Amino acid sequence: MPTSLKPKDLDNTDLHAYIIANELIIDQFKQIISLFKQQKRLQNMLSFIHQNYYKSISLQDIDESGNMNIAQCYRYFKMIVKMSPYDYLIHYRLLKSIDYLSDSTFNITEISEKVCFQNVNHYIQIFKKAYTLSPKKYQKNIEKGIYNNANSFSFFHLTISIQHK
């Protein structure tokens, strides 16, 4: 190390400690930058899902939006969101379907198509599994005034919980 770069008043032991401390700080900055990049990737993938939930979306489409490969995307979602990208997409579609169920001008088949379920029976089955009642029953309960605010019924406020992690 040239003497001009050596901090003044440090002997070799102190200099070694100084170098190690600087390396640790650099490593911490690298980790912070990596976390910011990962957060940005997750934001990109979630935004992609939120903007395209009504279209046919593949896992490859999601991972490309986050500039990841499929395996990375899957692991990252499981680690951060605690579910697979596909499961998140399904839950988001269910959440969006509740908005449509609140509008009695749409029937269940139209709603399932609007949120990109290819099969209305699959939509009904998934909805029942998530909310313990059928979409039609839920829609009737809204009409009866049982639910004041459709989204207050939803168990999947994922976008809010993810932003606060």
Image (tube, rainbow, N blue to C red):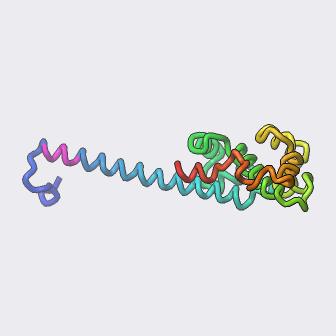
Question: 40 or 8: which is nearer to us?
Answer: 40
Q: Residue at x 26, y 50 (%)?
A: 22
x, y percent for residue 3: 12, 56
Q: Residue at x 81, y 55 (%)?
A: 115
18 inside magenta stretch: yes
Decide whether the magenta segment is chiefly helix, strand or loop: helix
Q: Would residue 89 be counted in the magenta stretch? A: no
Q: Which residues are magenta?
A: 14-19
Side (left or right) of 131 relative to 85: right
Q: Nearer the viewer, residue 27 or 92?
A: 92
Q: Quadrant of residue 150?
A: bottom right
Total tally of numbered discs in the picture: 0
Work out whether 23 lies above or below 3.
above
Residue at x 86% of width, y 43% of height: 134
Q: Nearer the viewer, residue 100 or 79?
A: 100
**Front residue of 122 and 9:** 122
* Image side of residue 44 versus residue 32, left or right: right
Residue 155 % position (x, y)? 69, 45
Whether residue 116 is visible, yes or no, is: no
- Give the percent coordinates (x, y) of residue 101: 83, 55
| Coordinates of residue 54 in the picture (x, y in percent) | 79, 58
Residue placed furthest toward the front: 145
Note whether residue 20 is visible: yes
